[in-house]
Image (cartoon, helix red, strand yellow):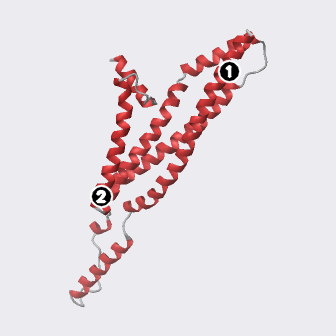
Amino acid sequence: WQSYAQHMRDYDEAMVRAWKEEVDTLLVFAGLFSAIVTAFNIEAYRLLQPDPSQSSIQLLQLISQQLAQGPTKAGTIGVPAAQNIFKPPTQSIRINACWFSSLICALFSALICIMVKQWMREYLSNPPSSPRHNVRFRQYRYDGLVAWGVPEMMAFLPILLELSLVLFLVGLVDFLFQLQCTVAAIATCLITMALLFYVATAIAPVFSAHCPYKSPQSWMLVGLRSKL
């Protein structure tokens, strides 16, 4: 039993160490990426608000029109109700929806990373006992780890961050088309090539078991294909 207990302990420590290294990497990426997306969101949310300078120009134009009609009507300056209603452009709504969704996904992935680290610390904690009891207690915990989907959750973390990145890039392209079409076209070409490379590396292991491009998303596709 002592040999079994030590073997299981070594296996668990290696598994948890690999998971912690991956979680630490994802946490760093999520933190840096969230800071970048936040900087863009600070500029993007203003697109959903009326421009004060534009409102002032419209008011001055209205006053000028009222004064031009004569002194008898100059004292009755009214602003039509329709002009007080601001409707943000559809493109601005799309941009903010993509970028704020991207930020939420990145923060959610960081939260899951922190929770996983806590779970792993608790998983390795083992009260002193006999080797036989330790083996049974370890198997009990490992079965719970698998039954509650912790390995699947670990595989889901990078996919969630990748989804966050894709949402940000989609919003970035939309934002650039609002500013300058040439710059937007160049950025779209580069982003499209990057996304095609990502999709190709995810799909390749489905058709070739020898392909080394193994990732959580590729294993997911392999599993889906095996069920069909």
Image x and y of residue 71, in percent:
24, 91
In the picture, the disc for residue 125 is none
Other-residue count near label 1 (Cα within 10 Å), few / some / many at <14 / 14–19 / ≥20: few
176 shown above or below 165: below
Which numbered mark, 2 or 1, is in the foreground of this view?
1
Residue 17's quadrant in the figure? Answer: top right
Q: Residue furthest left?
A: 69
171 shown above or below 133: below
| Residue 62 vs residue 1, the one in the foreground | 1
Apparent side of residue 197 relative to residue 121 in the rendered image (left or right): left
In the picture, the disc for residue 177 is 2
Other-residue count near label 2 (Cα within 10 Å), few / some / many at <14 / 14–19 / ≥20: some
Residue 228's quadrant in the figure? Answer: top left
| Residue 189 vs residue 211, the one in the foreground | 211
> Does the image show residue 90?
no
Image x and y of residue 10, in percent:
68, 21
Q: Tell me what residue is drawn at x 41 percent, y 62 percent.
A: 46
Apparent side of residue 9 relative to residue 193 in the rendered image (left or right): right
**Mark 2 vs mark 1: which is more N-terminal?**
1
Image x and y of residue 104, in percent:
47, 45
| Residue 21 vs residue 143, the one in the foreground | 21
Image x and y of residue 120, in percent:
64, 29
Apparent side of residue 77 relative to residue 151 in the rendered image (left or right): left
| Amino acid type of the residue tagged 1 in the rendering | Asp
The residue where tag 1 is placed is 10
Where disc 2 sits, the SS reads helix
Where disc 1 sits, the SS reads helix
Q: Tell me what residue is drawn at x 32 percent, y 77 percent.
A: 57
Q: Tell me what residue is drawn at x 32 percent, y 67 percent.
A: 84
